[in-house]
Image (tube, rainbow, N blue to C red):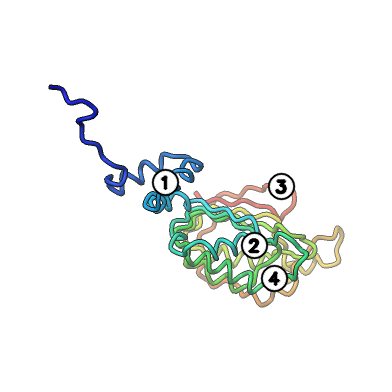
Amino acid sequence: MEPTSSTLPSASWHDLPNEMKLAVIDALDAEDVKAFSKVDQQTYQACVPAQFRKVKLDSYEALERFLENVPRSYCSHIEELELCTQSETTHFLPVLPRVRADSVITLLLASPAISKLVLKVAGSLDKSVLATFPYLNNLKQLSISNCGDEERTPLSERFVVYMAASIRNVEELYLDRITRSRMHAPELEGAYPCVPLALNDEDIPDHPAHHPRHPSRTRRMDDNARSLSFAGP
């Protein structure tokens, strides 16, 4: 007698090997993963790597909510992170630069698997954040831009150069609205046409002699000298 579907043994989702579960989940799009994760707690845990592979935080407040509500262990699954440090509103007292930087440091140190980082900062962060980047050994692609007012809150080239030079395995670097430092371009101060200059960045040290290799290709993204893209071979 041929076995019928009712007599064939059936395997429960929970009986599947973990590798097979992950393969199934990886084949789903983001919305389907989100819906599937609500089946039960065991399924939710299986969906965690896929759910947290790409994380986008659009403001400093979103970063704070993420740190408050998401278990630190989940951050180990983050491979692509888009992070904006600008506040959602200016009606409240401004956040101290060191406090803002501490939140960024907390997230980055908990996310060693990051390979792509898009960092949008409202002016400069406290220099304490720079100590984090040598530990991001998997980071290959870095994008840094100033989403604030470049006249009032410039993002210094010294800050960005130190950050980029600290990443051991960077292959692609994208810069936008990075401001020249008065230390390196004093001739621009008071010159016409007026361009923004970053001041008071003397406390950012020159990076040690251990520099990453120079990119082999450079592409100018627009006509001002503050938006550049670099890529390795």
Look at mark 3 in the image and give the residue it sits on: 222
Q: Name the residue furthest front.
A: 6
> Of the residues shown, which amino acid type is indicated by label 3?
Asp
Identify the image quadrant of residue 148.
Answer: bottom right
Label 1: few (<14), some or many (≥20) within 10 Å? few
Look at mark 1 in the image and give the residue it sits on: 39
**Label 1's element?**
loop
Camera-side mark, 4 or 2? 2
**Label 3's element?**
loop
The mark nearer the N terminus, 3 or 1, is 1
Please name the residue shown 54% across and 64% down the image: 67
Find residue 83 and report its horizontal and vertical position in percent: 60, 57
The mark nearer the N terminus, 3 or 4, is 4
The mark nearer the N terminus, 4 or 1, is 1
Q: Is 121 situated left or right of 114 in this image?
A: right
Look at mark 4 in the image and give the residue it sits on: 95
Please name the residue shown 81% across and 60% down the image: 195
Camera-side mark, 3 or 4? 4
The mark nearer the N terminus, 3 or 2, is 2
Q: Is 189 situated left or right of 109 in this image?
A: right
> Of the residues shown, which amino acid type is indicated by label 4?
Val
Q: CA distance from mark 4 to mark 1?
A: 39 Å
Find residue 52 and report its horizontal and vertical position in percent: 48, 53
The mark nearer the N terminus, 4 or 2, is 2
> Of the residues shown, which amino acid type is indicated by label 2?
Glu
Work out whether 134 lies above or below 222: below
Please name the residue shown 44% across and 49% down the image: 50
Please name the residue shown 66% across and 77% down the image: 203
Q: CA distance from mark 3 to mark 2?
A: 31 Å
Q: Are marks 1 and 2 in contact (CB under 8 Å)?
A: no
Look at mark 2 in the image and give the residue it sits on: 61
Q: CA distance from mark 4 to mark 2?
A: 10 Å
